[in-house]
Amino acid sequence: MTGTGRKPFETTDVVPFGAGNQRLRPPPSLRDPEKQAFLDLVTTTDPKQFRPSDLPLLCRWAELTVMAEQAAGELQAGGMVTADGRVSPWFTIHQQATKSLTGLALRLRLGPQSRAPRAPKTQPGTTSYYERMILEATRDDSAADA
């Protein structure tokens, strides 16, 4: 019975000729690593997600991403504890950068929680007598095995 029903298809988003690109461009003030982080973020999200007013937050996101990666690399190379037994200053830098990134992620709607559709406001139904009997029977069976 192959061939019945509707065939699946795949679409590709195509920008009409002359319509231009809707994605934000990195400002010239960003250095190359920050520019790459900016482009990685902007090109992996929906083109309509960010507006020009989001540009300063996106720039801070790119800067903090590079800062956190650099701090992580320094921590891997030198360890979290210095020779004199103190915590590496890179640990504090990494901690503050990642904390700031989580705050920006919420504001820029980057996390899976932000992308999920809102849950409908429904209330769970009551448990039926038969469901309760099944649950109690399971509990009684496990108590008898012990």
Image (tube, grey):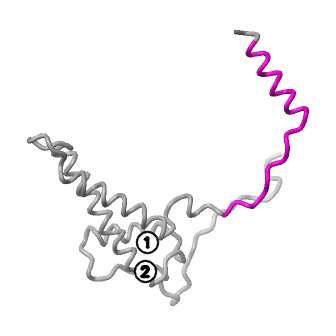
Q: Is mark 2 on a helix, strand or loop?
A: loop
Q: Do the residues labelled 2 and 1 touch (CB within 8 Å)?
A: yes
Residue 122 location (% of width, % of height): 78, 57
Front-lying residue, 14 or 94:
94
Q: Residue furthest right?
A: 129
Say if 59 sits above or below 100 in the image. below
- First to last magenta residue range: 118-143
Label 1 CA crowd tier, 10 Å (few <14, some 14–19, many 20+): some
Label 2 CA crowd tier, 10 Å (few <14, some 14–19, many 20+): some
Which quarter of the figure has residue 97? bottom left
Front-lying residue, 37 or 12:
37
Q: In this view, does 116 lie to the left or right of 120?
A: left
Instruction: Judge whether residue 111 is colored magenta.
Output: no
Which quarter of the figure has residue 36? bottom left
Residue beneath label 2, please?
Answer: 24
Residue beneath label 1, please?
Answer: 42
Tell me the amino acid under the disc marked 1: Val
- The N terminus lies in quadrant: top right
